[in-house]
Amino acid sequence: MYEWGRRRIKYESELDPAFCQTLIEKTGNDSIRNCIQCGTCSSTCPVSLYMDFTPRRLVAMAREGFHDEVLHSFTPWICASCYSCTVECPKEVKITETMYAIKQMAMDKGVHPARFPVPVLAREFYHQVKANGRTNEGRLITQLFLKTNPFKLIKQSKIGMKLFFSGRLDVIPQKIKNITQLRTLLKAVNGNGGGRAHS
Amino acid sequence: MSDAAAFEPRIVAFFCNWCTYTAADLTGVSRMAYEPNVRVIRVMCSGRIDPEFILAALREGADGVLIGGCHPGDCHYIEGNYKMLRRYRLLLKYLRAMGVDERRVRLEWIAASEGDKVQRVVNELTWTIRELGPLALPVMPQPEGAGASEESALAEANA
Amino acid sequence: MSKPKAGFNWFASCGGCEEAVVDLHEAILDVVAAVDIVFWPCAMDFKKDDVRAMRDGEMDVCFINGAIRTSEEEEIAHLLRRKTKIVIAFGSCSHMGGIPGLGNLFTRDEILEHDFTQSFSVVNPEKTYPQEVTKVPEGEVELPRFLDYVRSLNQVIDVDYYLPGCPPPVALLRNAVQAVLSGELPPRGTVLAPDKALCQECPRLDSKPDDLAITEFKRPQEIIIDEEKCLLAQGLLCLGPATRSGCGAPCVNGNMPCTGCLGPTSRVKDYGLSTMTVFASLFESKDEKEIDELVDKIVDPVGSFNRYSLPSTFLHRKANV
Amino acid sequence: MSNNGNGRTNGSPRIGVYICHCGINIAAKVDVERVTRFAETLPGVVVSKEYKFMCSDPGQELIQKDIREHDLNRIVVASCSPLMHEETFRKATANAGLNPFYFQMANIREHVSWVTKDKDLGTEKAKALVAGAVRRVSLHQALEKKRVDVHPDVLIVGGGIAGIHAALTIANSGRKVLLVEREPTIGGHMAMFDKTFPTLDCAACILTPKMSQVKDHPNITLWSYSEVTKVDGFAGNFTIQVTRKPRYVNEDECVGCMLCIDSCVYKQARVDDEFNQGLSKRKPIYIPFPQATPPVVVIDPETCMQLSKGKCKQLCAEACEKHAIDFNQKEEVIEVQAGAIILATGFKTFNPMRIPEYGYGRYLNVYTSLEVERLVNASGPTGGEVVLRDGSKPKSIAIIHCVGSRDHKTNKYCSRVCCMYSLKLAHLMKERSNAEVYNFYIDMRTPGKGYEEFYDKLLEEGTHFIRGRVAEVTDWALTDAEEGKMIVRVEDTLVGMPRRIPVDMVILSVGLEAQPDADDVRRLFGVSCSKQGWFTERHPKLAPVSTATDGVFLAGACQGPKDIPDTVAQAGAAAAEALAMIDKGFVELEPNTAFIDEEVCSGCKSCIPMCPYTAIKRDDEKKVAVINEALCKGCGTCVATCPSGAAQQNLFLDEQIYEEIEGVLNYV
Amino acid sequence: MTYLYYPGCSLKGTGKAYDESLLAVMKKLGVEQQEIDDWNCCGATAYMAVDQDRAYALASRNLALAEAQGRPNGKPVEVLTPCNACYLVLLKAQKRLEEDALGKRKLAGALESAGLNYEGKVSVRHPLDIFVNELGLDALKEKTVNPLNGLKVACYYGCQIVRPYSTFDDQYDPVAMDQVLEAMGAETLKWPLKTRCCGGSMTGTIPEVGMRLSFIILKEAKKRGADVIATACPLCQFNLECYQNEMREEFGEAVDIPVVYFSQLMGKAMGLSDRELGMQRLFVPFAVPAASK
């Protein structure tokens, strides 16, 4: 949001020239260098209207090293992973993957915007998988609201009840048989980020 | 395998004048860098390439050979490339029988506009051969080699 | 003036070449009359020491047949070289490695193991292998070393001339002897046979189509061979187009394809590759799969194209073994 | 193998080696000094020198001086690709009195310095290539180029503006031209346009006079509705087979009165009119447009009752006083000779069905730019009035740029003309309909004489320019204003906000693509083409209208998207190149032909089926193969095949190649 | 051929009806299936977004299990994956293991330490792909006993079924579901929102945005006269159906319209009972109108 008197200029010394490269290594492809700033991503995106920076602007900023703006932006947290930007991009920029990478970097640095419960959801998701091998939607949602906005839980309880009575809410989590194997597997992977998601 | 790091393959390439040689020029014009291990010999048509050249190159110390011709149907001389293809398929069988890894001799169709393909193919072949290691064809002692002096020594001893 | 001194020797070969000398029939008397045979272990009792005793270059000409496989053969080859003015590699084995040369498809150990333990006719439960030195009550007995590979004669010593063939055709031998006697010899290194391929003297050449395209390969036992028609046109692997002439095409006249014993003409560096090239180029198909199907019909490309010449190819022997 | 003698064919070589810096093009990645010193150590090398630009006059003089002073008899230049400067250095060698084929080139620019990152490795590679060239050149032999007379006629394929202009240029110089056009009329795409940018000349006004000149020119033979089906021969002497499709109307008789069309049993025109892009209908017997050249009707066998069903009252034939209609006309195949060929086969427009997001084919009022060209054309289906399919007038129009251009999923390249023609259409639409016109562009590209000024003019006219590539043309409305309209979803990238813009009409500025049969055509003429199907010129800068095949030239958009001024300029250039070749009267052929050494040839006939040009015959007397030098094109396939080494190829002797192999491998 | 079936967590929870109806329909069609034993969570979007490598590991375990249980016999093992998110993640992992040598090496090590091995012989398929491209529409027509005549269906594919790795249908305007339901007599809507995002997990995380996205889809389907929306994703179905009351409160406009799984409609046409198809689990009840019978 614009504040009166706040300066609107970027000095070269404030930029992180290595930022783009870091991001590229994270996503494993250098497609964002191909961006021609045509805006197809932003116009095809169903949620770009809720973002602080459109995906196109985020790519432009990432490429030029606007480290702070990019990591603090809530654009990636709004991304719904629908991939329409990725498939429509005329230069085959992997935008969705780039959003993932930005999220991971933001979480690593602990700078993600606090009001977005996505990391909370991810963390809960991770714990459930680690414990049972599968997720339980009911618990997922309950935990999410408990940890972010208990008030919402009350609001949503009506739906919850309905789900329960239509047999669509499993209260008892399903657990896979060979959970040891799964844990060994997850442990063997060198997590490439999101360190906080499973700490 | 510690030698593998130091080993740099020597590769001879035979490129046809019209498609692949021109493509390699385009790779240059487009400044697409590739592994420096390849030495290109220009012929007018892949049909000119005699398998004897390929094996002569291996015998002379090449670790791999690349043959580049026009795509099927595109040969500047109508169908020289098919003749090369036939020789190549038979040659591969011969190489297998003779214990030479067939990945060392590669035939590729590369059109004049495919500068990027030259880059890719040369890199791939170089990397493959780096993994395969030196060809090290068996060498036979040459006339007047060790055997000769041994015999003389033997003869003198017996004399 | 004394008669020229001549020698004959026999290394790794079947003995057929010696037979070819005998095949001179009455002409052999002329040879004997014209030269002094000072060394011919096959026919008369000569020992190594007899050769050693000669002066260097004492023999005017020596015909050497057979490839080099053992240490003894190598030693004697060098010895003969020193004692001889003109060394003539006599027959395919000596010229290009010959049939024994196909031993280069295997390692020495593979051959020994097969021959002394696995062969049908062998019973050798203790796996006894020939030893180079064996102690017997009388002392030590030595056997020559079985070398790692087979070589043609020129891969061991310098060779002056080559008389190709398996065995060399009598006519060529006669010409060679005459040339030696008259002293009218071509440049060193020459193969003493016409420098044109067999098709030149093939009686069936006219039946060879101008637009020959190979669509199939047959083995001689699979078809009834037309006695008039070009063998290649009948789908047989006839190596005539790539092989030196001078033999009078006895195989073709006997209704069998040429197998290439006279080796290549002078411009060819690798006989097997050269023959493969001509056949492959003549395949009809342009489709990789079909080509491979045809290639599959050539069961043994090395044996088919390098029957007599494996050691003198670019590769010499099977690699990476 | 040492058992076969391999005497060198030439006596003691005295070789001069010249290494080029090419400014820093080579010197940056090759230590030229080191390579020069290395070359001195090679056998036979008498002098080894380096120079900044070998191809320059002083560079060439350096070689010539050395030839005379050091009595050199062999020259090696290590510089760029032989395809670039081999001829230059051969001439330099010849000017010093040496046979030009005592020369060999090592390519240390395209194949070394430009593709190698490390200078040491580049230097090593350059050394290897120089060694190969030195070893090879010592076996070079003196050769002579063969001269062949040139046939003076020119064949031009394609009768769009490029073919028309080239044909007129050549015909005006007094040479004969055969112009072959696939469609029933010449004129190509330009004939469909209304106005041309940036001057807004009427396309018909400037094109149709040229079309009639073609028809009337005594030196031009025009074969429309015809295709080239076979090409044989070589530069200066092409034999071309042309297939003339039956138009079922005798071309010499028809006067273009069109009475036949009026009397066709079809009272109503029912067939989509190709010329009007399907926006109007025509009859089975038709003339593509009033100024069609030749002005001869044509019958479409697919829809004509007589030709498709075999049953019709044949009212057309009755109506024709000249009795020109002939239902029995058959396809004709004619063989012609020409010395040079100009390809001017043009382009096709991108089919926007491939981008379903833009709704072409789904929403009625989404048009391609070519359709709109017809729509605004006074002789078009609406007489130039801008109306939608339901007859209403659009109040707002979106023009979407880069449809099928700059897009990895369709065509990666920029089609070059769309920005300008979009501006032209924006102007025309505004002028004719007074609608709000929105241009959606990624980058505005107006590099041409008067082009930027045209853009300025459009800006002044109040047309909207929104920088952003459209994601979607859709019809789901979010606001009342959007109801019943098509909505263009786009990010206004300059504002940084997504926008939804409701419009009545959408114009897709479709890109240019190569003709769908470009691949067959290029094979026919032996030229190469890029992955996208554009014919490849011999050199992008220095030989832009020549091809890899001597005697075949390119004009117009078949070589790549281009606008009318560029097309005409290129057509003139192609005409000039063709004329230069013809007026010289002869062509020189490379001496790299094959020959047979009768001493070695056994007459085994293996080489005969190898030759695609039937240049090899067997001399039954001598029992040896004989190569007809005039027919041989020098591929060397017979040489590689010959099992006894009797067949050899000039400039590519077996021994020369073996020397080069040994040289590049064992150079240290 | 027997397909290996990977239901995913949602089909055992909120998407139970999808599981039930799909299995019933496949049984009726004679498509044999066998659930992958001991499958685990696919590693879906929420996970993929923050810990890519572990997400791939989760997916790979499923692929490895499938490969072992399917006993590849030259042909790839076909894994039937009805949930959009699972489909995308498994497909993405499969592609990565195919194309990215480095990624493969990384994963292979991890799999090995867990006693697993994946050789790349699994092909991930969506039921719609199977119905259209393997079974064929004629087979579906044959099994139709109660054609859905007169029923106007808005086919809603969701985003991840055709993007970005899948190739069986157009990425912008897919038609597989339309073809299936048309073959069974229904009339399908030509509309531009077939693949527009429903909001995904945002209905939970940022409900104001998530609900808005679902609302747009429901409103447009209703406006175009759809009787019912057919979905192919448990999350889409949940978002579109369960929040309809909340949407009415939030946006002041009723968008009540039944939202069912395409497999439920198929089952209706094939004469299966409501119970078999899990119809009782719907929040917004749906019955094929009498007129259409």
Image: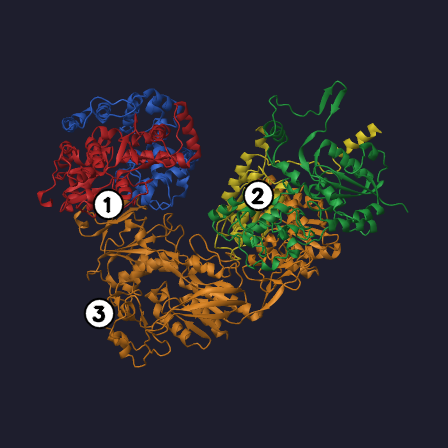
Q: In the figure, C205 relative to D125: above or below?
A: below
Q: Residues within 10 Å of mark 3 (few under 14, many from 20)?
A: few
Q: Amino acid at mark 2?
A: Pro
In the displayed structure image, the side of residue B131 where residue A166 appears, left or right: left
Q: Tell me, by letter, which chain the rendering colours yellow.
A: B
The chain ID associated with circle 3 is D
Up-down relation of residue D23 to residue B139 (above or below): below
Secondary structure of residue under mark 3? loop
- Alpha carbon distance from label 1 to label 3: 40 Å
Q: What type is the residue that disc 3 sits on?
A: Gln
Marks 3/2: CA–CA distance: 73 Å
- The type of residue carrying mark 1 is Leu
Residue with the mark numbered 3: D268
On residue C301, the disc is 2
Q: Quadrant of residue C88?
A: top right
Task: Using the rendered image, report if marks 3 and 2 lie on a common chain.
Answer: no
Residue B58 percent coordinates (x, y): 61, 41
User: Color of chain C here?
Assistant: green
